Each structure stands twice: as C-alpha cells, then as structure tokens.
Amino acid sequence: MTSIEASPPEAAPRQWLSERQSATVVALLDAALEEGREVGYDKLTIRSVAQRAGLTHTTAYSYFTSKAHLIAELHWRQVRSIPAPEVADDATFVDRVCAAFEGPAAALASDPNLSRAVFLAIVSDEPDVTRLRGAVGAELVERLRRALGPHDDADLVSALFMAYSGAMMLAGTGTRDFLEVIPRMRMVARLIDPT
C-alpha cells in the first residue's frame, strides 16, 4: 500500500482553529473560488484573494503559506463536501467501485478550471500541501473501502486507488476529460472483479 493509503494524516487540516479563525479560513476559501472563477486560477494570488475577502494579505498568509496551499485546501473542502456513496447490499463489485469515485470525479468535472489548478497545486512538495494531499488520499481510500463493503481487500483498494489516481492525472493534464474517469474506472473494475 502507498503511504497515502497506509495511514491518515497526523492531524485533520485546520482542527486547531477557533470559531473566528475558521470563519476567516472559510471567507478566504470562498473568495478564492470567486477570484478563480472571475480572473482564472492562474492569475489568482493570495493578495487578490485577501482583498476580495476584505482582509489583509498578511492575515491571509497566516492561514495559507502559498497559492498551492490555498488551492489544495479548496480541493480538500470540495472532497469533504461530497456525500458518502450509497451502495445497495446487492450491488456488484463494479457498481461499488463506480459509486466510490463518481462523486469526486463529478465534482472535478463540474469545474475544469479549478480541477486543473488543483492538479498543479497538489503535486507541490510544500509541507502544507503534502498534508492536504494525504488527507484527500485517505478520504478517497476510506470512501472506496466503505463502498466495497464485503469486497474490501487491501490489494484491491490499492490497485483501484492507483487506477483512479492515474485517470485523474490524465484528466488533470488535459490528456483526457474528467468525464471519462468513471467509464475508465468501470472498465478497470471489470478487469479486476474478484467475484
């Protein structure tokens, strides 16, 4: 298993914030979405996001160390907001795999500009981004494990997570479309179906 799958991040992102600080983070993330949609994520800066949120850039930098960190946290918020997959008891292995990944893939497909920005940000080796990447990976693996139910097997989870990660990388680079991710995962699941 990869390190993402082996253990969750040391601490959930932002768990130490007060209510007021949490509200500031939410305001900055909301402003980042607005700014990114208006001017493009490539032109977004911490300073412009802070200004849009009505905060100083020094306040923004106390919460986000970089643009990559800000965009990675947008992605973490996006992943956490996706409802857990609903899987019928009699669902096939293939349907279980697709149920696990449909929500995350659809969320990325719904905003391709943000998704490309996420792809560029999430590969950063900055400590804050690394922590968020681990949190996102752990959440996706947990979604898959819950969806697989009786088919939950460490090797299957690892193989499926790697296939999903590869499909998302192809979509993030523009080689494929995010809408192709689920049909490709359906094909992969059929190929490795243990039932």
Image (tube, rainbow, N blue to C red):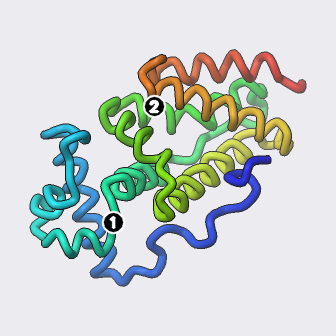
Residue found at the far bottom of this picture? 18
Q: Amino acid at mark 1?
A: Phe
In the image, residue 149 sits, relative to residue 18, either above or below, namely above
Residue 31, x across and y down, in percent: 19, 56
**Where residue 16 sits: x, y (%)?**
46, 81
Identity of the amino acid at label 2? Ala
From the viewer's side, name the closer residue of 187 and 84.
Answer: 187
Classify residue 151 by image quadrant: top right
Q: Nearer the viewer, mark 2 or mark 1?
A: 1
How busy is the neighbourhood of tag 2: few (under 14 within 10 Å), some, or many (20 plus)?
some
**Number of numbered discs overlaid on the protein picture:** 2
Percent x, y of residue 139: 60, 52
Quadrant in the picture for residue 29 = bottom left
| Relative to 125, residue 27 above or below | below
Q: Along the horizontal axis of the image, is 25 left or right of 96?
A: left
Please tell me whether mark 1 sits on a helix, a strand or a loop. loop
Write the residue at 22% across / 59% down: 46
Who comes first in sequence, dot 2 or dot 1? 1
The foreground one among 109 and 39 is 39
Of residues 28 and 119, which is closer to you in this image? 119
Q: List the single residue furthest toward the front.
A: 125
Mark 2 vs mark 1, CA separation in Å: 26 Å
Q: What's the mark number on residue 64?
A: 1
Q: Nearer the viewer, residue 53 or 173?
A: 173
Say the numbered circle drawn on residue 189. none
Residue that lies at the very extreme toward the right in this rendered image:
195
**Residue name at image x 51 percent, y 18 percent:** 180
Label 2 SS: helix
Which of the labelled discs sits on residue 106, or is there none? 2
